[in-house]
């Protein structure tokens, strides 16, 4: 069984994101970038499936500038077998990523594609669903458990009221939620080994995909600053303050 996993390079989750002075986006210059945390979970799941003998080959795909190669190398060091970098300096919105992934899926013919449920930079939560729609494949989103058996995937999904378990016919698209697993750290020997693994470099034009943005960002703003709180002596004072403020 062949598995494709999408890995996006995003601002590291520990970084305090700053809005650019001209409000066109967030500051990326000299900012630490890492693999999207949900994609690390995707790679971990793929590697566990390989270790269990269910999956034979893991292909890690990333799209964006040249530095996305580092993100693919991280996936290779965690245990992916080879990588595909679709190199572009243009902005890629979820629809463009989904179209490119569809083209790669048609070439690579994986049995399952794993993506993160969302990228922590744009928080779109769209790419996996769009990819499944474009391919006409089943989808299991927000997976907190994944089991593959003869031609089927059983996905336990995190939904508002609790957990939902769905059975999908393969090939299928699965997106990862936080509780699916805890990603491993790559060991030094595996980081060294990953340097020898192949990464194919492609461009959107190689796949004949039009990546022109369909959405326009009007402006990006910091959230409003919270005003300072006050201390109250007891519950009675709390209630009277809440009444004064019109909260209750
Ligand atoms: P989004 O729909 O933007 O929130 O992204 C959801 C998931 O799609 C991410 O967790 C990745 O697995 C995948 N994805 C989105 N953009 C890219 C990209 N540029 N390169 C690789 N994977 C991506």
Image: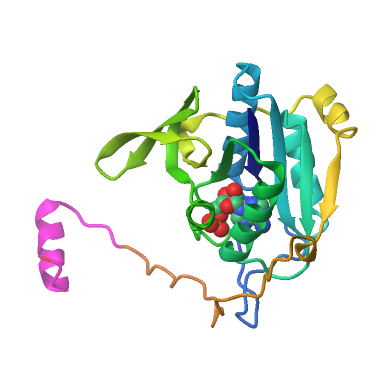
Question: Image check: 237 left or right of 29?
Answer: left
Q: Quadrant of the C terminus?
A: bottom left
Residue 99 coordinates in the image, percent (x, y): 62, 60
Magenta segment includes 245: yes
Residue 209 coordinates in the image, percent (x, y): 69, 66
| Residue at x 75% of width, y 63% of height | 204
Does any portion of residue 102 appear in the rendered image?
yes
| Residue at x 84% of width, y 22% of height | 189
Q: Quadrant of the N terminus?
A: top right
Where does the magenta region start and end?
230-247
| Residue at x 81% of width, y 54% of height | 67
Question: Image check: 73 left or right of 4?
Answer: right
Residue 65 coordinates in the image, percent (x, y): 79, 60
Q: Residue 43: name its quadrant.
A: top right
Question: Image check: 85 left or right of 94?
Answer: right
Question: Image check: 86 left or right of 141?
Answer: right
């Amino acid at each position: 069984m062949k598995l494709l996993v999408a890995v996006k390079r995003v601002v590291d989750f520990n970084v305090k994101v700053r809005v650019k002075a001209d409000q066109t986006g967030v500051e990326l210059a000299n900012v630490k970038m890492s693999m999207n945390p949900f994609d690390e979970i995707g790679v971990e799941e793929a590697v566990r499936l390989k270790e269990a003998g269910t999956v034979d080959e893991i292909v890690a795909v990333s799209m964006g500038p040249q530095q996305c190669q580092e993100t693919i190398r991280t996936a290779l060091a965690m245990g992916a077998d080879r990588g595909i970098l679709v190199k572009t300096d243009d902005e890629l919105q979820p629809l463009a990523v989904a179209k490119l992934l569809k083209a790669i899926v048609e070439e690579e013919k994986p049995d399952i594609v794993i993506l993160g449920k969302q990228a922590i930079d744009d928080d779109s939560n769209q790419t996996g669903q769009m990819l499944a729609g474009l391919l006409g494949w089943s989808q299991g989103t927000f997976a907190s458990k994944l089991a593959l058996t003869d031609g089927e995937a059983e996905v336990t999904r995190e939904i508002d009221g609790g957990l939902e378990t769905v059975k999908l016919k393969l090939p299928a698209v699965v997106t990862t939620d936080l509780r699916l697993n805890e990603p491993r750290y790559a060991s030094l020997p595996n980081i060294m080994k990953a340097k020898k693994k192949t990464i194919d470099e492609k461009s959107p034009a190689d796949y004949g995909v039009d990546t022109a943005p369909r959405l326009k960002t009007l402006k990006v703003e910091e959230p409003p600053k919270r005003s300072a709180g006050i201390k109250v002596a007891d519950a009675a004072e709390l209630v009277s303050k809440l009444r004064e403020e019109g909260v209750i």
